């Protein structure tokens, strides 16, 4: 408890300093004093700043929280608004946290509450004064937490949920469907709820904001771990496609492989052809591709690229839009394309419009 109290005291001190520095940048504002609430039960106001604006005395009532995740922000804003209504109706409410994402900032705007974060984002509006500042940086801890939500095991859970975002899941069922532990599902559940990308109904957990989830995943996406190998084949056009479709239909044979990236998009949502065929495969699947497509290793000028995956779980999350045309799922294909340069981003946007539109 002592460690937590000391942490919050330090955070409130930093918040107070950030508020002072922001207000002092505006010539018409004279900062009279800043009061930090004594430690004790949280009543909804941690800092009160008294200011003078062109001869008029005003008060800024601030609530400080250690997290700026949207779910926690929403609760804190309600607490702050209730405090203002009961104790300081003429005061301006302000929410302060170490970092506030665009979604969290939007919540503050909706509730007409000013905000400041310790990264430098801020918005204060009162009595003819308008202060707004946006920075591009994110704290390392926030980036780390966000990336952890999209690590391979967690991503297996997200892929299952994104197949049908409105489907509600019990924790046990979701763990079985994603082939991960209950602990992994619980961690993902917390991350989704904190960011308000998911909600809980009587039937279970479901995605309420799949587009926001996918947008963030795209921005922090890391390709699956594996060896990228380039090959050349004399086959081309329909002959190459037919040979690939025959080998991808495993029919019980050892080895897994699938069309990936631009090659998968060609079957899922055709946009434009490329001169290179892309595949994901396991080791046995690679050998089958080498044999069926007459692949020869080459240092440059390849027309076939095979990524041999360290973990073949992606090869069990596929679609078959035509006989033998085994493709990475629309979600995986979208993520790969979105990170494949300008042309890939265009193909990704096309795929999303065709295959990844969900009802509100």
Image: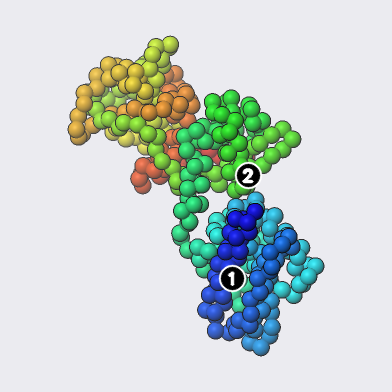
The residue that mark 1 highlights is 16
Q: Quadrant of residue 343?
A: top left
In the image, 251 versus 264, the foreground residue is 251
Decide if residue 39 is in sight here. yes
Residue under the point 52% across and 41% down:
149
In the rendered image, residue 352, in percent from the top left (x then y), is placed at 49, 40
Circle 1 residues within 10 Å: few <14, some 14–19, many ≥20: many
Q: Name, please, the residue furthest toward the front.
A: 2
The residue that mark 2 highlights is 193
Q: Name, please, the residue furthest toward the right.
A: 86
3D distance between C-alphas at marks 1 and 2: 29 Å
Q: Earlier in the sequence, mark 1 or mark 2?
A: 1
In the image, 270 versus 60, the foreground residue is 60
Locate residue 300 relative to residue 238 in the image: left or right. Answer: left
Residue under the point 66% across and 33% down:
168
Image label count: 2
23, above or below 299, in the image: below
Could you say which disc has been placed on residue 60 in the image? none
- Observer-side mark, 1 or 2, equals 1
Q: Quadrant of residue 254?
A: top left
Locate residue 278 relative to residue 155 in the image: left or right. Answer: left
Locate residue 68 relative to residue 350 in the image: left or right. Answer: right
């Amino acid at each position: 408890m002592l460690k937590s109290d000391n942490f919050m005291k330090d955070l409130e001190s930093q918040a107070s300093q950030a508020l002072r520095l922001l207000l002092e940048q505006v010539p018409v504002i004279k900062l009279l004093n800043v009061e930090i609430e004594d430690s004790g039960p949280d009543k909804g106001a941690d800092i009160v700043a008294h200011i003078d604006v062109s001869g008029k005395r005003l008060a800024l009532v601030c609530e400080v929280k250690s997290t700026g995740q949207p779910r926690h922000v929403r609760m804190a804003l309600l607490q702050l608004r209730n405090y203002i209504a009961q104790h300081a109706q003429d005061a301006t409410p302000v929410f302060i946290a170490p970092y506030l994402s665009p979604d969290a900032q939007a919540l503050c705007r909706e509730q007409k509450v000013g905000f400041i974060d310790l990264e430098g984002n801020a918005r204060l509006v009162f009595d003819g004064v308008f202060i707004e500042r946006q920075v591009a940086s994110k704290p390392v801890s926030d980036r780390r937490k966000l990336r952890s939500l999209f690590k391979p095991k967690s991503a297996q859970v997200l892929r299952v949920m994104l197949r049908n975002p409105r489907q509600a899941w019990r924790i046990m069922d979701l763990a079985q469907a994603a082939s991960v532990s209950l602990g992994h599902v619980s961690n993902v559940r917390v991350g989704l709820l904190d960011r308000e990308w998911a909600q809980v109904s009587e039937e279970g957990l479901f995605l309420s904001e799949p587009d926001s989830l996918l947008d963030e995943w795209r921005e922090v996406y890391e390709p699956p771990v594996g060896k990228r190998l380039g090959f050349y084949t004399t086959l081309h056009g329909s002959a190459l496609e037919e040979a690939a479709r025959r080998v991808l239909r495993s029919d019980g044979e050892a080895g897994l492989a699938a069309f990936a990236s631009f090659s998968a998009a060609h079957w899922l949502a055709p946009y434009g052809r490329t001169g290179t065929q892309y595949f994901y495969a396991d080791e046995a699947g690679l050998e089958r591709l080498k044999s069926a497509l007459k692949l020869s290793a080459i240092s440059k000028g390849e027309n076939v690229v095979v990524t041999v995956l360290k973990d073949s779980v992606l090869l069990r999350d596929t679609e078959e839009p035509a006989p033998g045309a085994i493709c990475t799922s629309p979600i995986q294909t979208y993520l790969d394309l979105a990170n494949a340069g300008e042309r890939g981003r265009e193909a990704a946007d096309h795929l999303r419009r065709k295959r990844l539109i969900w009802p509100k």
